[in-house]
Amino acid sequence: MTALFLKETWRNPWTLGLLALPPLLALGFLGRGEGVGLVGLYSGLLLLLPPLVLGLGAPLLASREEWAFLLGLPLRPFRGFFLGALGVFLGLGLPLALGLLLGAGVLGLTGEALLWLLLSGAGVLAFWVGLAALLSALLLEERRALGLGFALFGLLNVLYGPLVVALAVRLKDYPLEGFLTLALLLNPQEVHRVGLLAGLKAPVLTGPVGYLVAERLGEVGPFLGFAHLFLLGLALALLGALVFARRDR
């Protein structure tokens, strides 16, 4: 099942966009230092990578007709769906990794910065593939899965910062520390960004969300941020497989 979904992912010509995207983004951060280039490229990926992942992954994972055929094979639904999501992750991961290597070459990244660029790309990809898998399992209809996925992208990657800061300022006189901490944990992409800034000591302001992360969660290193990002993506994919298996009954 993994090989099948990987092959289907590679057949889509838009997958090549993952190869071209990082080096094009990297051009905007030439000559600004290793730390700034890394964090800038990661922030750019947060805005441009999720729509590609949703657009390429959700139609495969949410197709009722495709699953109606595949579940005729001697394969348990939970295992089949999870292996399908893994195939999408691997199918998108290879061109993304090559694109990140090209982007690192444009920026002249070496050593630790190169490693964290590859891990950051893998973490963001895992998170959005996991989210696409869960939405696909819940809805089993391509358009609805894509619509809800793009709505969550807008919330988590466009509106998230202003909303969290507005809540923190507006509700500062109320005992809502637990709610605010939960809001920060629900978007591990920002937690990892703050960890990268702190770990690499990049001369870039963390912004108000970074201040809130440090205040509510304490010091977050890049490895902790990456683990949170990647493992949450894995958990979402497993939850999607569980939902799919229960629906198949």
Image (spheres, rainbow, N blue to C red):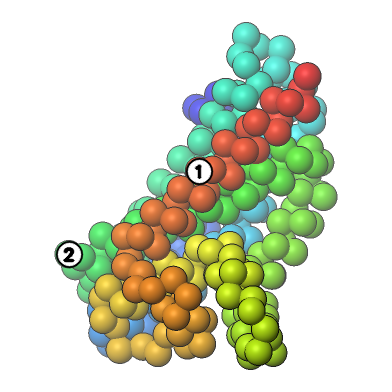
The residue under the point 71% across, 12% down is: 72
The residue under the point 71% across, 46% down is: 135
Please indicate whether residue 115 sits to the left or right of residue 3 in the image: left
Q: Secondary structure at mark 1?
A: helix
Point out the tag, 1 or 2, that comes first from the N-terminus. Answer: 2
Q: Position of residue 141 (x, y in %)?
A: 81, 41
**Can you say whether 124 is above or below 78 in the image?**
below
Depth check: give the residue in front, 212 or 245.
Answer: 212
Q: Which mark is residue 234?
A: 1
| Amino acid marked by disc 1 | Leu
| Amino acid marked by disc 2 | Gly
The extreme top residue here reads 74
Question: Which residue was labeled with disc 2?
Answer: 111
Q: Specify the quadrant that holds the N terminus.
A: top right
The extreme left residue here reads 111
Depth check: give the residue in front, 58 or 155.
Answer: 155
Visible in this render: residue 119? yes
Please indicate whether residue 148 sits to the left or right of residue 171 in the image: right
Quadrant housing residue 197: bottom left
Q: Which mark is residue 113?
A: none
